[in-house]
Amino acid sequence: MSEQRHGTTHGAPGAVPAFPDLPEATIARLPEYLRALHNLEDGAETISSEGLAAAAGVNSAKLRKDLSHLGSYGTRGVGYDVALLTAQIEYILGLDQRRAVCLVGVGNLGHALAGYDGFAGRGFRIVALFDAAPGRVGEVINGLLVRHIDELPQVAAEESIAIGVIATPASAAQAVADDLVSAGVTSILNFAPCVLSVPSGVDVRKVDLAIELQILSFHEHRKASLTALPGGRVNGAVGTEAVGS
């Protein structure tokens, strides 16, 4: 999981007077709120907490508590100002800066990520692609030339890259992470199925699709077990435990 780093005081145009100290769970939900706001019908000026919560897939009480951390409480009987709330969340997430991102590893997954056009609308620019395989270097994907990983330090400095995406096999991921850190990258999104070791001050988020499928498999197994016997009793135990930590 990623470390949380907190800022100090910043000014946000028409939004938050100071950078808030947010719980990790709230940070994780802010992109969902932003996606829901962007998906509203054109011309919507306000939205109720219930409407936004339903669109984001959370309960309204949780949403109101999350947004209160931003200093946004809405107006009773009216709801939240869509434009202002969108600006607040984009500011907190740092999406007003169009952050430069590099991608290392352009195999099947990396190739798909490099060709995805949706990042631009979410506040990110993929500015460089890297690989070490001779058959990949020199390829052009979505208008970007695949460079050799040895060029990473120079390109990272030229493009002011702060975020790197690793889409390599697990065996190469740690070496790539080391290269990214050495080049000044301070945030890493890791798609490789392994745990990375990085210095303090470098944030890592891990995306492992196999793990997510295994978790869903557990839920499928549990549901099947709970319906296997009358009353949901499995091997003498009532199968009503809540799942989670």
Image (cartoon, rainbow, N blue to C red):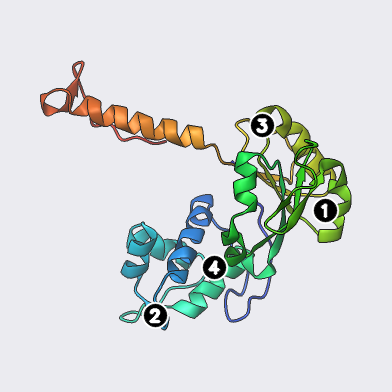
Callout 4 crowding tier (Cα within 10 Å): few <14, some 14–19, many ≥20: many
The amino acid type of the residue labelled 1 equals Ala
Q: Which residue is mark 4?
A: 89
Q: SS for tag 1?
A: helix
Among numbered discs 2 and 4, the one appearing first in the sequence:
2
Q: Amino acid at mark 3?
A: Pro
Question: Dot 2: few (<14), some (14–19), or many (≥20) neighbours within 10 Å?
Answer: some
Q: CA distance from mark 2 to mark 1?
A: 41 Å
- The residue under label 2 is which amino acid type? Thr
Q: Nearer the viewer, mark 3 or mark 1?
A: 3
Q: Is residue 244 positioned above or below 16 on the image?
A: above
Q: Report the residue marked by disc 1.
A: 156
Q: Are marks 4 and 3 in contact (CB under 8 Å)?
A: no
Of the image marks 3 and 1, the number of the one nearer the N terminus: 1
Quarter holding residue 21: bottom right
Task: Count the marks.
Answer: 4
Residue 123, compared with residue 167, is above or below; it is: below
Element type at mark 3: loop
Q: Residue at label 3? A: 169
- In the figure, residue 105 lies in which quadrant? top right
User: Left or right: 224 with respect to 90?
Assistant: left
Give the structural element (helix, strand or loop) at label 2. strand
Q: Is residue 173 above or below residue 165?
A: above
Q: CA distance from mark 2 to mark 4?
A: 15 Å
Residue 205 image label? none
The residue sitting at 63% across, 66% down in the picture is: 95
Residue 136 point in image, percent of width and height = 75, 41
Q: Residues under labels 1 and 4: Cα distance?
A: 27 Å
Q: Is residue 3 visible?
A: no
Q: Earlier in the sequence, mark 3 or mark 2?
A: 2
| Label 1 packing within 10 angstroms: few (<14), some (14-19), many (20+) | many
